Amino acid sequence: MAGKPKLHYFNGRGRMECIRWLLAAAGVEFEEKFIEQPEDLDKLKNDGSLMFQQVPMVEIDGMKLVQTRAILNYVATKYNLYGKDMKERALIDMYSEGVADLGDMIMLLPLCPPDQKDAKIAQIKEKTTNCYLPAFEKVLKSHGQDYLVGNKLSKADIHLVELLYYVEELDPSLLANFPLLKGLKTRVSNLPAVKKFLQPGSQRKPPMDEKKLEEAKRIFRIK
Ligand SMILES: N[C@@H](CCC(=O)N[C@@H](CS)C(=O)NCC(=O)O)C(=O)O
């Protein structure tokens, strides 16, 4: 029997958090090998484990997979979270990419220079309320179903709900005018596997604070 997937990343959200969410929502147990020093990353690079010299890297089913989206797509396919046909898959990809665009802006916020931070936050809030959340609310409204695609949970729902948690962390009022998104968030959060992941003590990572930011900068040698 194949062992648990092993996730190689630093002990923070970054690009690995969406992979943690997806595995957890699929009910898959996973191990984490944390990169704690720049030398740990060098070791992975030097032993040929990282095709493009970057993490996230996930050891799964005898492979060492890199590239966040490739990893997500493999997990989604394996655990039946990727639609029933080409058209559903195209929609799931389209929604997931939209989530990633806004999610990346939020993820990179801590790296924003202090003098540009307020403007960046304002820009993110504007895009959240005027573009991304209305777009997803419209999808749910258009078909009246419980999930974004095919009336069945897919990776798009999981990515979107993860994003909604980050949006709320930024400003809880941003979700106020989106009742269907709030409903999706509640529905997905109440799925037993997700509920477990949302509880304290799970492998979910907290928001990036100053200390974590310094750790990430040191490990990834970000100036
Ligand atoms: N397109 C890649 C980007 C990966 C990436 O930028 N990884 C960063 C950490 S978040 C990294 O490994 N940086 C170390 C380096 O480039 O030396 C993905 O989505 O996985």
Image: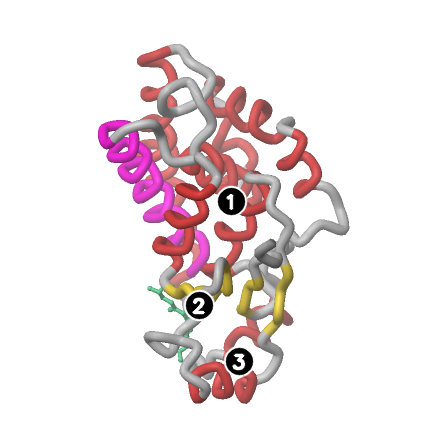
Tag 1 or tag 2, which sits nearer the N-term?
A: 1
Give the magenta-colored segment's residue range. 86-108
- Percent coordinates x, y for residue 140 in the rendering: 38, 19
Judge left or right: residue 220 versus residue 149: right
Tag 1 or tag 3, which sits nearer the N-term?
A: 1
Q: Neighbour class for label 2 at 10 Å: few (<14), some, many (≥20)? A: some
Q: Is mark 3 within 8 Å of ligand 1?
A: no
The residue carrying mark 3 is: 219
Q: Image quadrant of ligand 1?
A: bottom left
- Percent coordinates x, y for residue 122 in the rendering: 39, 47
- Percent coordinates x, y for residue 108 in the rendering: 42, 60
In space, the residues marked 3 and 1 are separated at their CA atoms by: 25 Å
What residue type is disc 2 on?
Answer: Lys
Q: Which type of secondary structure does the marked residue at label 2 adopt?
A: strand
Whether residue 119 is visible here, answered yes or no, is no
Q: Quadrant of residue 80?
A: top left
Which residue sits at x=56%, y=35%?
Answer: 172
In space, the residues marked 2 and 1 are separated at their CA atoms by: 18 Å
Judge left or right: residue 150 versus residue 173: left
Which of label 3 and label 1 is nearer to you?
1
The residue carrying mark 1 is: 22
Which residue sits at x=35%, y=30%?
Answer: 83
Residue placed most toward the observer, 78 or 223: 78
Q: Which type of secondary structure does the marked residue at label 3 adopt?
A: helix
Residue placed most toward the observer, 112 or 7: 7
Q: Neighbour class for label 1 at 10 Å: few (<14), some, many (≥20)? A: many
The residue carrying mark 2 is: 64
Q: Quadrant of residue 98?
A: top left
What residue type is disc 1 on?
Answer: Leu
Q: Residue furthest right?
A: 201
